[in-house]
């Protein structure tokens, strides 16, 4: 795949691999240290890369939702001691955070779908008009 920018992104938004167009579009990932090759870090902290996204706030929301889902999975399956007395409080807190993340992600999916439908209508109007 050489005619479109491409990235391989890990579960913590680390950029694991990229093609030349991806590097030309976003950043020279070879020049960055492995710790700096992280989309969450780059979008929040690098003004140049954040400006590449037309709706930086939406992209930041998507990243936060994704990281919340990863956090819930890791905490729930690997770090939670289910025998502790405050187990249910932690469980409820993680469920609330996950529901908020799902709401944000669902909202983003809805907005993307709406944009695609609108774009399709505009293309259809151009063809008929």
Image (cartoon, rainbow, N blue to C red):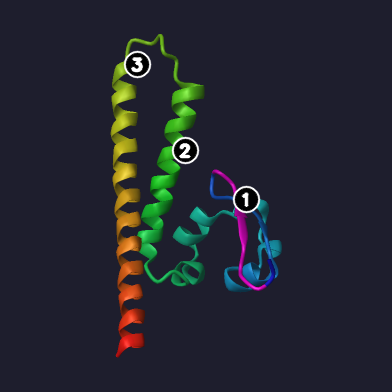
Which one is in front in this view, the residue at disc 1 or the one at disc 3? Answer: 3
User: Relative to the observer, which residue lies in front, 127 or 46?
Assistant: 127
Picture layout, residue 66 above or below residue 19: above
As for residue 117 lying within the magenta part, the answer is no
Specify few, some or many for label 3: CA neighbours under 10 Å numbering under 14, 14-19, or 20 or more: few
Give the labeled residue for mark 3: 87
Q: Residue at x 58, y 72 (%)?
A: 25
Answer with the quarter of the image where residue 97 lies.
top left
Q: Residue at x 65, y 73 (%)?
A: 3
Q: CA distance from mark 2 to mark 1?
A: 19 Å
Residue 98 lies, in percent from the top left, at 34, 36
Tell me which numbered mark, 2 or 1, is placed earlier along the sequence. Answer: 1
Q: Earlier in the sequence, mark 3 or mark 2?
A: 2
Quadrant of image for the N terminus: bottom right
- Residue at horizontal 62%, vertical 68%? 22
Q: Nearer the viewer, mark 2 or mark 1?
A: 2
**What residue sits right under mark 2 in the picture?**
70
What separation in Å lies between label 1 and label 3 (alpha carbons)? 33 Å
Segment colored magenta: 3-11
Q: What residue is shown with label 1?
A: 35
């Amino acid at each position: 795949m050489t005619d479109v920018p491409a990235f391989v992104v890990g579960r913590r938004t680390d950029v694991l691999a990229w093609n030349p167009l991806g590097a030309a579009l976003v950043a020279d990932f070879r020049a960055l240290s492995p710790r700096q090759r992280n989309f969450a870090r780059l979008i929040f902290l690098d003004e140049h890369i954040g400006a590449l996204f037309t709706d930086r706030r939406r992209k930041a929301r998507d990243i936060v939702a994704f990281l919340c889902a990863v956090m819930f999975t890791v905490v729930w399956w690997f770090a939670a001691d289910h025998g502790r007395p405050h187990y249910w409080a932690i469980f409820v807190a993680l469920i609330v955070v996950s529901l908020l993340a799902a709401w944000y992600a669902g909202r983003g999916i809805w907005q993307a779908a709406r944009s695609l439908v609108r774009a399709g209508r505009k293309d259809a109007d151009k063809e008929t008009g």
